[in-house]
């Protein structure tokens, strides 16, 4: 690669006013398409979930590269459905790693060529090796990204066990999920997953009604209760599914759960209104509760986190077209730091830590990534106050949080059976 | 109305019927045929395979007979889910019928001025002014643990501690359905009542009928078509609804629609289609039963 062999552009030079020009030039060096194309309308249809489709990112891409992003916001399930049934309806897709077991065999996604990704070798080892940058190996139960990150070849639908040039997804964002709690209503420390089914919180607990994720939270609880140790929480046998659902069903019949939630806003409402005091939750939902002035903690727990990760892939419908070049230009822009910093400021993690770090203020980096007390007030990208000076992030630093990952969102081999059992649980 | 034979109708009549028939064929018959077709297909994790198999129907009711006939009889998931849906559906139907009939009666016979009728009618549509999601969410501050109703109960001493079953329960689901769908009862019943010749009521009065006798012998029989049409609206909507059941039931109450939705979410289109066909069949049986009571075509 000519670009990578040439003298590296200093990171600082990317930040300045010339950033846009440099990025565009970089992308051209990478993909080698002539400047004439810049005069044609540059539009990318971006399929993904609404949570990741920020108007700020679209605006900034347009500003930096001239690419107009057309968001197609759908639910997680619908992303999978559209990739499989309507590959012509989008150019680039932002999907989760656990969906890949369904998506890759369909042949509707193109392998991502690492040679066209400027910072391919700098992607965090969480994805490539299943370890932290410090070298610490993290939990790999479930669909850990390293298991499905690479393909054996450009046209292969087989996952490679070793890093190759061909990636299934170029990672964008990931995080470690845990339980959210209302400290003001619980009034005591919560340290274990088993508290979710503690009768003390009868009628005040909730779990999410997305079978593949809900069952893993349940498995965390069951391991924490000391009832059973799963060889792989993300890939249970039928007996293990039965065992897990039995515990959940008994809890449901005993009235442990106030409600289940499926939608981000539902989880915010349950928690903010005090209907629940402990529940499965997503990081931005905790932020949303907090921003209403209601105390809510994304509680780190002894057994660790359930992690998830998402990334970009291209539709086969744009194979070897100018759109594909455009998509690579966009992906390269995304990894270049601005988007990463934007995501980090919301409590997510970016796939390229160093580029994101360059675009964050030192005090922001210290708060979000190093787990240090905030030197100044911490604000969300839109300017709302998230934490006052002196606060510490729930769960601490990147190494503390990602290092404590126990399992990853997954699709099990026994998925059909599991969905059936989940429906039984809801009907119980 | 004298029924003419089909042969007597000319080309213009057929041509007039064509656009609607076309719309029906395209948006109703074709999707329906496709659904039935897919319900017979096979599937795996990421694709559906053209086939003719009873697998999806078989799996939907798998073990139902065994469980019912076992030493400790219990219902299988599918039957239990249908029963829950049916129970909610019938409860909602009874309540909306009672409410809808009463309101329509009031509007039709007690309100004399057309303007007032229109104004009151518009008030009935208020529940539809907001989006489904907002409407659902707005129940929490009212019925929730710290909601208005509970606050009132606790401060007046009617309840020692907040009542939990107000929200995320059968009760909440039924309240929401009644709130939403009573209008679908009111409109057709009101329409039927407005067509009742007022002279008939006077005749009943003159013949010495009491208020109840007039109601049961004159008004109800003549309002029957409206009642049946309203019932069909309510039953079909409630049978298929899973959003309301999901939100108001805290996702803890199973509904057939939710079951189909979960399967679709996991790309299990053939079993979802099979359930859809079974659901359609059960709704058709309900409607068939209703039309046995009143021949709508004759009454209109």
Image: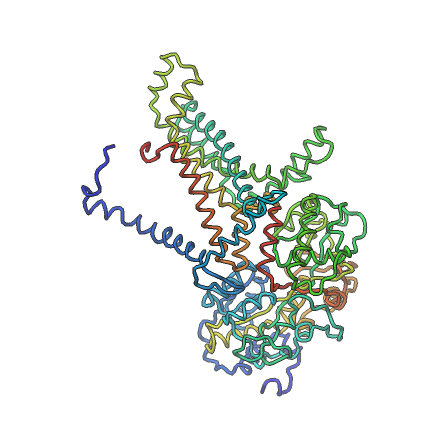
Question: Does the image show residue B243?
Answer: no
Residue A359 position (above or below residue B82) = below
Residue B201 picture location, percent across and down: 37, 19
Seen from this angle, which residue lies furthest right?
A188
- Left or right of A422: which side holds B220? left
Residue A214 lies in quadrant: bottom right
Position above or below: B29 against B162: below
Task: Name which quarter of the figure residue A18 lies in.
Answer: bottom right
In the rendered view of the protein, which quadrant contains the N terminus of chain B? top left
The reply, left or right, for residue B37 in relation to residue A5 is left
Q: Is residue B213 visible?
A: yes
Where residue B245 sits: x, y (%)? 56, 44
Residue A150: % across, % down = 60, 76
* Residue B12 vs residue A49, the one in the foreground: B12
Q: Is residue A152 left or right of residue A368?
A: left
Q: Residue at x 69, y 43 (%)?
A: A255
Q: State the quadrant of the C terminus of chain B.
A: top left
Q: Residue at x 36, y 16 (%)?
A: B202
Q: How is the image coloured?
A: rainbow
- Taking A93 as reference, is B211 left or right? left
Residue A53 in the image: x percent, y percent?
57, 62
* Nearest to the observer: residue B233 or residue A112: B233
Total numbered labels: 0
């Amino acid at each position: 690669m000519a670009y990578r062999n040439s003298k590296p552009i200093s990171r600082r030079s990317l930040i300045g006013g010339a950033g846009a020009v440099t990025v565009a030039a970089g992308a051209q060096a990478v993909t080698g398409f002539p400047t004439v194309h810049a005069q044609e309308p540059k539009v990318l249809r971006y399929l993904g979930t609404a949570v990741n489709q920020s108007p700020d990112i679209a605006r900034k891409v347009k500003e930096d590269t001239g690419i107009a992003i057309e968001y197609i916001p759908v639910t997680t399930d619908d992303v999978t459905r559209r990739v499989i049934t309507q590959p012509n309806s989008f150019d680039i897709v932002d999907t989760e790693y656990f969906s890949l077991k369904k998506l890759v065999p369909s042949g509707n996604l193109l392998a991502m060529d690492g040679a066209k990704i400027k910072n391919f070798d700098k992607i965090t080892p969480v994805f490539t090796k299943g370890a932290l940058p410090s070298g610490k190996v993290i939990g790999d139960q479930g669909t850990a990204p390293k298991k499905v990150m690479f393909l054996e070849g450009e046209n292969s639908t087989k996952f490679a066990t070793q890093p190759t040039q061909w990636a299934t997804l170029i990672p964008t964002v990931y995080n470690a999920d845990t339980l959210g709690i209302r400290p003001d209503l619980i009034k005591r420390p919560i340290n274990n997953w088993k508290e979710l089914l503690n009768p003390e919180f009868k009628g005040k607990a909730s779990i999410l009604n997305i079978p593949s994720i809900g069952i893993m939270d349940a498995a965390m609880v069951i391991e924490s209760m000391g009832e059973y140790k799963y060889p792989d929480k993300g890939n249970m046998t039928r007996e293990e599914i039965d065992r897990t659902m039995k515990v959940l069903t008994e809890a449901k019949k005993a009235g442990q759960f106030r409600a289940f939630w499926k939608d981000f806003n539902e989880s915010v409402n349950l928690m903010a209104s005090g209907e629940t005091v402990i529940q499965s939750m997503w990081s931005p939902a905790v932020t949303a509760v907090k921003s209403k002035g209601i105390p809510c903690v994304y509680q780190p727990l002894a057994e660790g986190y359930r992690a998830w990760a998402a990334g970009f892939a291209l539709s086969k419908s744009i194979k070897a077209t100018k759109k594909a070049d455009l998509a690579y230009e966009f992906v390269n822009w995304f990894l270049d730091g601005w988007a990463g910093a934007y995501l980090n400021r919301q409590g997510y993690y970016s796939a390229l830590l160093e580029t994101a770090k360059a675009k964050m203020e030192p005090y922001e980096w210290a708060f979000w990534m190093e787990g240090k007390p905030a030197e100044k007030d911490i604000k969300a990208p839109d300017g709302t106050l998230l934490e006052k000076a002196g606060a510490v992030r729930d769960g601490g630093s990147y190494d503390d949080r990602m290092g404590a990952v126990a399992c990853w969102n997954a699709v099990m081999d026994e998925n059909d059976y599991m969905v059936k059992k989940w429906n039984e649980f809801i009907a119980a | 109305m004298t029924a003419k034979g089909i042969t007597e109708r000319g080309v213009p009549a057929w041509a007039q019927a064509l656009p609607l028939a076309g719309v029906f064929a395209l948006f109703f018959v074709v999707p329906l045929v496709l659904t039935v077709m897919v319900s017979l297909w096979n599937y795996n994790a990421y694709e559906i395979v053209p086939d003719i198999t009873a697998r999806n129907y078989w799996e939907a009711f798998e073990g139902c007979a065994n469980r019912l006939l076992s030493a400790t009889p219990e219902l299988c998931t599918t039957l239990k889910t249908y029963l829950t849906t049916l129970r909610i559906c019938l409860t909602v139907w009874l309540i909306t019928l009672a409410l809808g009939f009463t309101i329509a009666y009031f509007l039709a016979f007690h309100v004399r001025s057309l303007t007032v009728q229109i104004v009151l009618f518009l008030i009935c549509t208020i529940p539809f002014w907001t989006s489904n999601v907002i409407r659902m969410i707005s129940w929490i501050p009212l019925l929730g643990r710290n909601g208005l109703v509970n606050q009132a109960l606790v401060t007046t001493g009617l309840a020692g501690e907040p009542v939990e079953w107000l929200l995320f329960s059968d009760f909440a689901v039924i309240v929401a359905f009644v709130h939403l769908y009573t209008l679908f009862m009111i409109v057709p019943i009101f329409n039927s009542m407005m067509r009742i010749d007022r002279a008939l009521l006077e005749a009943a009065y003159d013949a010495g009928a009491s208020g109840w006798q007039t109601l049961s012998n004159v008004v109800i029989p003549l309002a029957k078509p409206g009642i049946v049409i309203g019932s069909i609206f309510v039953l079909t909507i409630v049978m298929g609804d899973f959003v309301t059941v999901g939100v108001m039931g805290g996702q803890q109450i199973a509904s057939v629609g939710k079951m189909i939705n979960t399967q679709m979410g996991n790309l299990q289109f053939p079993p979802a289609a099979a359930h859809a066909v079974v659901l359609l069949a059960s709704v058709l049986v309900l409607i068939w039963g209703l039309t046995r009571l009143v021949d709508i075509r004759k009454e209109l």
